[in-house]
Image (spheres, grey):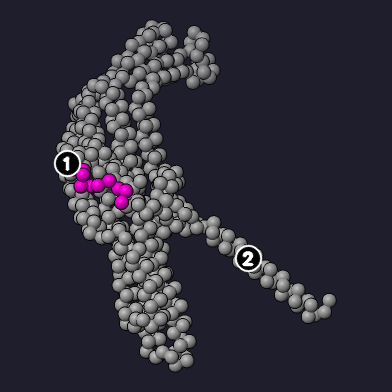
Amino acid sequence: MSSKDFRAASLCRLLTCCVLLLTTAITAKAQDTLHINLPEAEKQFLEKNLQLLAEKYNVSIAQAEIIQARLYNNPNLTFSGNLYNPARKQFFDLGNRTGQYEVEIQQMISLAGKRNKQIQLARTNASMAENAFFDLLRTLRYTLRSTFYQTYYLQHSMKAYEEQIASLAKMDATYKDLQQKGLVTLKDAVRLRSLLYSLRADRTSMQNQLNDLEAAMQLLLQNNHAWYVLEMADTAVNGIPEIRQTSLQSLVDSAYANRQDLQLAQNSMQYNQQNYRLQKAMAVPDFSLGAAFDKRGSFVDNATFLNVGIDLPFFNRNQGNIKAAKYNADQAKLLVQQQTQAVENEVQTAYAKAINTDKMLETIDPAFRGQFEQLLSAITDNFLKKNISLLELTDFYDSYKENMLQLNQLQNARMQAIETLNFAVGKTLFNNK
């Protein structure tokens, strides 16, 4: 084989490798780009979110503590025997006529219902753990849905930029050739290019925002190896039930029934009241009952005894813990009142915002977006045909960009207001179909 043929074969192999690598990279990129809608995102979130899964263990821990609270005190068995008999020079001299040992068994009996009170306390603590879990679920689900809508509408805004940039890039290339031929002025060519650069700079800034939102989505869905393309039906926003048909009072009542943080505050108040009763019961000393056998160390051989014991509450009657528990119970009552007012205020504020965004969107013609996009294509064609000036073109591009962004922002604002209302109520009452 000649050196020329060898170089040709090497070049061919190199090109083949490049093609294979490029194909692999494209395939990997396609695998890393996932199209996902909101129900799929929520399903993946419930199955994989580590923070949620970790919090669920607290519920299991609290339920295990109920089992522990139900258990009775263990009896105590004591054995005392002769280690060494110097008279007989024998170790462990227990069984003969001169040996000695004692056996005693005791059982602690809790009085004043301490065991039942501890069981009630453990059950309330388990309810609090469940409240904390579901409140975390409410918070993370709101974060997921809010981030989903922000990302979805920002991706739509990015598409509007890409369409403008693609159109302007073609015109810029055309104007560059025409300017070199002296058919258009340098001023017009530079002005068109500056508009293109401005759009690219805006898109870069928007891409950075999108990257932050995508990182939040990846963390919520526990998948750092996928870039999500969010999907939602065009009628999703319009398919949400009319908020104004629902009364504010019904939403407040629903929040009282569903807000886990409010139920957590109520259970915390109950826990402190139960703890106060338990601490008062702890002032009553426990009762000890037992029996003993003494082989040879008492007034008679093989003596048997009944043992009864109780602490005398002369000094420690648990006064400090009782007083602290009473203060905690009083404090918990105030916190329940404060949380109740906060829930009502949050629902009222979210309800007002949702109605305001609804009213604003009602003033916008649903066909406006499509008409504007058709007009963009017509304006571009007319500019290339020199039916309109460069100034009119740039003004229209600026108007198109601002209006598309405002439309996406308004629709996102409505969805954010609805999700905030759902979050305030503690239940997804308003959802797209």
**Label annotation for residue 21:** 2
The numbered dot on residue 249 is 1
Q: Majority secondary structure of the magenta segment?
A: loop
Quadrant the N terminus occupies: bottom right
User: Quick check: is 241 in the magenta stretch?
Assistant: yes
Cα separation between marks 2 and 1:
62 Å
Which residues lie in the magenta part?
238-247
* SS for dot 2: helix
Kind of residue sitting beneath label 2:
Leu
- Residue type indicated by callout 1: Gln
* Residue at 47%, 18% in the rendered image: 82
Using the image as rendered, state which of residue 199 and residue 245 is in the foreground. 245
Q: Residue at x 34, y 41 (%)?
A: 133
Q: Position of residue 45 (x, y in %)?
A: 42, 47
Q: Identify the mark at residue 125; answer none if there is no mark.
A: none
Count the labels in the image. 2
Res 265 visible: no
Question: Who comes first in sequence, dot 2 or dot 1?
Answer: 2
User: Residue at left 39%, top 31%?
Assistant: 64
Q: How many residues crowd around disc 1 within 10 Å: few (fewer than 14), some, or many (20 or more)?
A: few
User: Compared with residue 211, is residue 290 higher up or lower down, i.e. above or below?
Assistant: above
Residue 418 is one of the magenta-drawn residues: no
Q: To which quarter of the image does residue 147 belong?
A: bottom left
Foreground label between 2 and 1: 1
Left/right of residue 197 with respect to residue 417 in the rendered view: right
Farthest bottom residue in view: 182
Q: Residues within 10 Å of mark 2 (few under 14, many from 20)?
A: few
